[in-house]
Amino acid sequence: MKCAVSDFDRTLYVDGTISREDQEAVERWQQAGHWFVLATGRNESSLRERLEELGDGAICPDILILNNGALILDKAGKELYQKTLDHHTAMAVLEYFDQADEAGSGVSLRDKKLNVVREAGMKTTQKVCDGEITLREAKYLEDILQIHHRRPDNPAIIDRMCEEINEKFPDAAAYSNVWNGDVVAKGVGKAEAIHLLEKMKGPFEEILVIGDSANDLEMIRQYAGAAVSVAVREVLEVSAEIVNNVAEYLEAHL
């Protein structure tokens, strides 16, 4: 049995949908007895909402790697792995973002995602989620899987912020994902999640990975994976293959 791991946004989920070509290729892949895994920076509810919009059975992953690897679920939704941020580190990162700008941030918990703002009603660049709390209220949160910061006006700022977080906070790992910055516990990442999956559910005949953004970089590097042609430069540079879409990659390795 082979295992194919695909990033979601801008790799499989493009312009608000998953193409019929990609859906059919995933179905053929699974019908051949192989696993199809989604690895994303999204939280569970956000990903499931997008999949449900496509209709019943459009894509049925065998495993979900969520929050950049902080949470792994099986097909039935059973938790296989979870690693949360150290509480002190999480609060320090939220304060770092708050001092950097007035864009607000987001926090992913196991069952929901909340926007975090300095003051109630403050404007934020974060996407609408399951509620809003102030930075002061966030201090009472436990078990934060991931912190998000979104700056669609300037992705370069996100790159710089992630670099600074990785330098300043030894217990955190920050990944830039175009205009999103995702912060998880040190040692958490998509590549690490695939390693865990190998130990729990392997061995696999072959592991394929495909992605487009900086948070896909290490899994593509470690597994000699592929990049879609619209991937960021650093991902294109380390990829063993460059393809137009997920379907092309799966069909070549079926």
Image (spheres, rainbow, N blue to C red):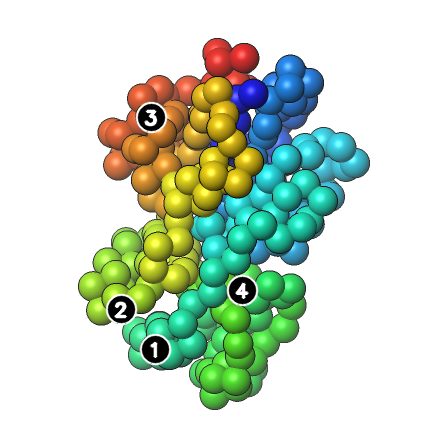
Can see residue 144?
yes
Labels 3, 4: front one: 3
Which badge, 2 or 4, is on the more N-terminal residue?
A: 4
Q: Identify the residue at image location x=25%, y=29%.
A: 237
Q: CA distance from mark 1 to mark 2?
A: 8 Å
Which badge, 4 or 1, is on the more N-terminal residue?
A: 1
The location of residue 21, given as percent across then percent down, is 62, 20
Q: Identify the residue at image location x=45%, y=72%.
A: 104
Q: Identify the residue at image location x=76%, y=32%.
A: 57
**122, 212: nearer the viewer:** 212
Mark 4: few/some/many CA within 10 Å (<14, 14-19, 20+)? many
Q: CA distance from mark 3 to mark 1?
A: 35 Å
Mark 3 belongs to which amino acid?
A: Ala
Q: In the rendered view, does 224 fall on the left or right side of 80? A: left
Q: Secondary structure at mark 3?
A: loop
Quadrant containing the N terminus is top right
Q: Which residue is mark 3?
A: 224
Q: Which residue is mark 4?
A: 108
Q: Which residue is mark 2?
A: 169
Q: Which residue is mark 1?
A: 92
Residue 151 versus residue 56 in the image, above or below: below
Mark 3: few/some/many CA within 10 Å (<14, 14-19, 20+)? some
Which badge, 3 or 1, is on the more N-terminal residue?
A: 1
Can see residue 245?
no
As drawn, which residue projects farthest toward the left? 167
**8, 167: nearer the viewer:** 167
Q: Quadrant of residue 74?
A: top right
